[in-house]
């Protein structure tokens, strides 16, 4: 039995797309309430039809008074069931009810705005009463792993990291229990990764950086001496991403992902820019500038730390594409190339798959003298377009 004073008005039915975390229109155009998503993608109820005078009056009310204006309750609940817990605030001139816990799919709620309690309104003004609810429609394309880098199927035995790219934002806190490394017999490799309390996500939660335990990569460290390296030369391994890993909306991935690879000889040499091959485009075109590397490089760093400048050191705007198993960097400018002198500029933090950077090896044996190290933060490679 619905509590006294509650009655169902026109029903707002918001369709919740599974995996999106946000409701979408259409709503009943006659409804005075709307369903909106806040900055954290939480669904909130909002009354958007206050008059200018009412907005000014509501703006002068304290938080306790605001709580008395707008209330939400599960429809047809018994009298002893309390109202839905939440907070009422004024947001951009609209009264918003933010539930303490997310609204549940499949339930119908009643909302009441006690308009007579707004200062200046007639004490006999009727309440605004409406019902609302949510239905779920599965997405045709749930969240999936779109890329795993490095993409090659032959990787150095001292591989430093993997990058996992997702089609939509993911949840935090599950990564290390959802990723596994199997040997050729399908047995899980023990403790291969560096498990950090703060998982390494990009700001959009769509790229996860998975680090191998460096203590089992660098020579002379106790974990490597006591436990052994993670990868052994010549062996095959499979990286497995569980389907049960949930995205930011709480839904599992579209499918399990498996990437198999063979561990090759260790890569212990610094990057040498003199081995890069630059293929200049023709002037007057937007053909890409192509730079080829003798080995795969770090995909994420290639996107961020390599750029093109003109003779005046002005950066050329354009788009970067990483191809050919991360051995090729392609740059397409926004406008056609002009004939002249240019420079390819790279931060010396650029790395290969084993963490070796420009002029510096990641794993330096203390018994081997370092022949050369580049002290500058940038390397500049000149090239010309046209005659």
Image (tube, grey):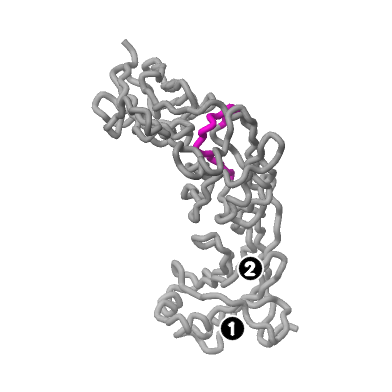
Q: CA distance from mark 2 to mark 1?
A: 26 Å
Tell me residue 126's x, y (percent).
59, 83
In screen coordinates, is 341 left or right of 197?
A: left
- Which quarter shows the N terminus? bottom right
Residue 275 appears in the picture as rendered: yes
Q: Nearer the viewer, residue 200 or 317?
A: 200
Query: Residue 103, labelled with which disc?
Result: 2
Q: Nearer the viewer, mark 2 or mark 1?
A: 2
Q: Nearer the viewer, residue 212 or 27?
A: 212
In the rendered image, residue 108 lying in the magenta stretch gets the answer: no
Give the magenta part as a residue range. 151-167
In screen coordinates, is 223 left or right of 178?
A: left
In screen coordinates, is 364 left or right of 295?
A: left
Tell me residue 157's x, y (percent).
54, 31
Q: Which residue is mark 1?
A: 126
Q: How many numbered marks, from 0 up?
A: 2
Please, which residue is most extreme toward the right here?
Answer: 1
Which corner quadrant of the image does residue 278 belong to?
Answer: top left
Please, which residue is most extreme toward the left here?
Answer: 312
* Residue 224 to residue 19: above or below: above
Q: Residue at x 63, y 30 (%)?
A: 235
Q: Nearer the viewer, residue 370 or 96?
A: 370
Residue 24 appears in the picture as rendered: no
Tell me residue 94's x, y (percent).
48, 70
- Which quarter shows the C terminus? top left
Mark 2 or mark 1: which comes first in sequence? 2
């Amino acid at each position: 039995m619905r509590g006294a004073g509650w009655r169902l008005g026109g029903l707002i039915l918001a369709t919740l797309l599974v995996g999106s975390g946000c409701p979408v229109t259409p709503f009943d155009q006659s409804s005075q309430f709307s369903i909106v998503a806040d900055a954290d993608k939480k669904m909130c109820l909002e009354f958007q039809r206050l008059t200018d005078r009412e907005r000014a009056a509501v703006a002068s009310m304290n938080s306790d008074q605001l709580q008395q204006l707008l209330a939400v309750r599960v429809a047809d609940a018994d009298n002893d069931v309390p109202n839905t817990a939440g907070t009422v605030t004024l947001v951009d001139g609209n009264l918003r009810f933010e539930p303490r816990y997310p609204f549940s799919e499949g339930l119908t709620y009643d909302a009441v705005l006690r308009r007579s309690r707004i200062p200046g309104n007639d004490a006999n003004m009727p309440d605004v009463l409406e019902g609302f609810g949510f239905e779920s429609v599965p997405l045709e394309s749930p969240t999936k792993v779109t890329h795993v880098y490095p993409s090659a199927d032959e990787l150095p035995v001292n591989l430093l990291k993997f990058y996992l790219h997702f089609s939509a934002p993911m949840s935090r806190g599950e990564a290390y229990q959802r990723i596994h490394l199997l040997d050729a017999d399908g047995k899980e490799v023990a403790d291969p990764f560096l498990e950090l309390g703060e998982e390494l996500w990009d700001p959009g939660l769509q790229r996860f950086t998975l680090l191998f335990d460096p203590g089992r990569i660098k020579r002379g460290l106790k974990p490597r001496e006591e436990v052994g390296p993670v990868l052994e030369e010549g062996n095959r391994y499979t990286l497995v991403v569980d389907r049960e890993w949930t995205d930011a909306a709480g839904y599992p991935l579209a499918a399990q992902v498996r990437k198999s690879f063979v561990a090759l000889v260790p890569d212990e040499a610094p990057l040498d820019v003199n081995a890069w091959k630059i293929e200049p485009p023709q002037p007057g075109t937007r053909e890409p500038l192509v730079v080829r590397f003798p080995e795969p490089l770090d995909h994420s760093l290639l996107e961020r730390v390599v750029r093109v400048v003109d003779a005046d050191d002005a950066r050329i705007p354009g788009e970067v594409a990483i191809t050919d198993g991360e051995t090729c960097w392609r740059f397409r400018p926004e406008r056609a190339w002009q004939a002249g002198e240019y420079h390819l500029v790279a931060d010396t933090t650029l790395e290969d798959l084993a963490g070796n950077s420009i002029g510096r090896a990641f794993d330096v044996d203390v018994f081997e003298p370092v022949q050369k190290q580049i002290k500058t933060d940038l390397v500049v490679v000149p090239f010309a377009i046209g005659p």
